[in-house]
Image: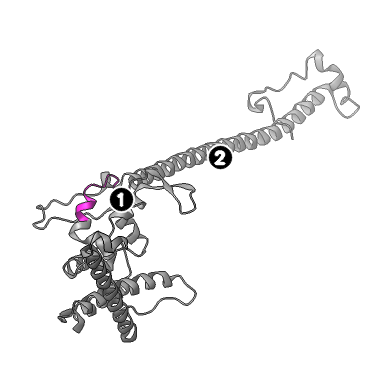
Amino acid sequence: MPPIINNPNDLECPDYASDTFANARAAFVNANMTEEQAVAALQGLWKVGNDAEKVLWQQQVDQEALDDVEQVRLAEEARDARQAALQLEDEAARKEEVKRHRSKYIAIPMRDAPSIAPIFPAPYAVKRLEQGSYLELYYFTNRGLEAAKHTIAPPDDDTLEIKTNTDGSVSWVPAAASRDPKGVVADRDIDWLEFTIAVPRMLRAMEQAGWAAERVKMIATFWGTLMTHPYRDSPDPIDAKTLLVYQDEQRMSWHRMITSPTGAWDLARINDALLRDTKERVYNEERTRKDRERDAQASALCSPRERHR
């Protein structure tokens, strides 16, 4: 139905007695209806039609009011949705800002400076532990921590640097995830003093990196067992070296096997057969090294004529 343009409440009944409506009156006048009665009939018909239009007009006004309310509601919902979207964008931007510049937003506890200075391992070491990967104990020795003082990139630095791969190709890697392998000392080549210093530091770092408690406990038991093993107090230096080599090889193999189809094992359980094999290899390597030193010394004592004979 088309909308009503004019308010029927503002309309007045036409003057049906005027000459303008003579033809309309004539249509009603007959033997039973006078002209005055025809005027009254026309007025009555107009009033019926006007009353009907008043009802439709009121319905139209009410509907328009409802439509206005609905439009206001929809506009408010759209405004709220825009504000919510902007708020989500602001929150996401805030979270990204905090993530990228975490140190700027960490709450600082109001307390005294620690009596024992905190340690700061190399960024590479921090990244490796966060990944749950193998890491040499060297990074937590005094030598390793001293070398870390000269590292430029912090652990959360996103700076990229070029890395030359084994096949000669190059790739971009985070600066904090790379290291200089020239200065790193394998576990087998650190001494027992460095080992005992590095172990508790590395265990704390594992906990801080979120390692599972049972895994940290396993490694702690593994290292503790080696520290109290009879070989440790043996007067034969081969025995002490055997424990360092065994620790180096077993922990590295254990890390590699974690993601393998067969999985890893309980590192804390010392395999005596492997330990004996390791001792034999260490002994042979030491004997070979001494033989070469002896031969080199003997060669150095030979006369020039004998050396060129």
For residue 227, above or below residue 195:
below
Asked whether, in this view, residue 7 is left or right of residue 189, the answer is right
Looking at the rendering, the stretch of residues picked out in magenta corresponds to 145-156
Secondary element under disc 2, as helix, strand or loop, is helix
Amino acid type, label 1: Pro
| Foreground pick, 281 / 178 | 281
| Foreground pick, 32 / 120 | 120
Q: Is residue 288 in sight in this rendering?
A: yes
Q: What's the residue at 67%, 27% (across, down)?
A: 8
User: How many numbered tags mark residues here?
Assistant: 2
Q: What's the residue at 45%, 43% (across, down)?
A: 84
Q: Residues within 10 Å of mark 1 (few under 14, many from 20)?
A: some
Q: What's the residue at 63%, 23% (across, down)?
A: 10
Is the stretch drawn in magenta largely helix, strand or loop? Answer: loop
Residue 285 appears at what percent x and percent y? 30, 74
Question: In the rendered structure, which disc, 1 or 2, sits on the residue that comes first in sequence?
Answer: 2
Residue 85 appears at what percent x and percent y? 46, 42
Callouts 1 and 2 close, C-beta under 8 Å:
no
Amino acid type, label 2: Glu
Q: Report the disc number at residue 155.
A: 1
CA gap, disc 1 to disc 2? 55 Å
Dividing the picture into quadrants, the one containing residue 132 is bottom left
Asked whether, in this view, residue 101 is left or right of residue 193, the answer is right
Residue 91 appears at what percent x and percent y? 39, 44
Residue farthest bottom in this picture: 273
| Foreground pick, 243 / 210 | 243
Q: Report the disc number at residue 70.
A: 2
Q: Report the disc number at residue 301.
A: none
Within the magenta stretch, is there residue 129?
Answer: no
For residue 226, above or below residue 3:
below
Q: In the picture, which quadrant includes the N terminus? A: top right
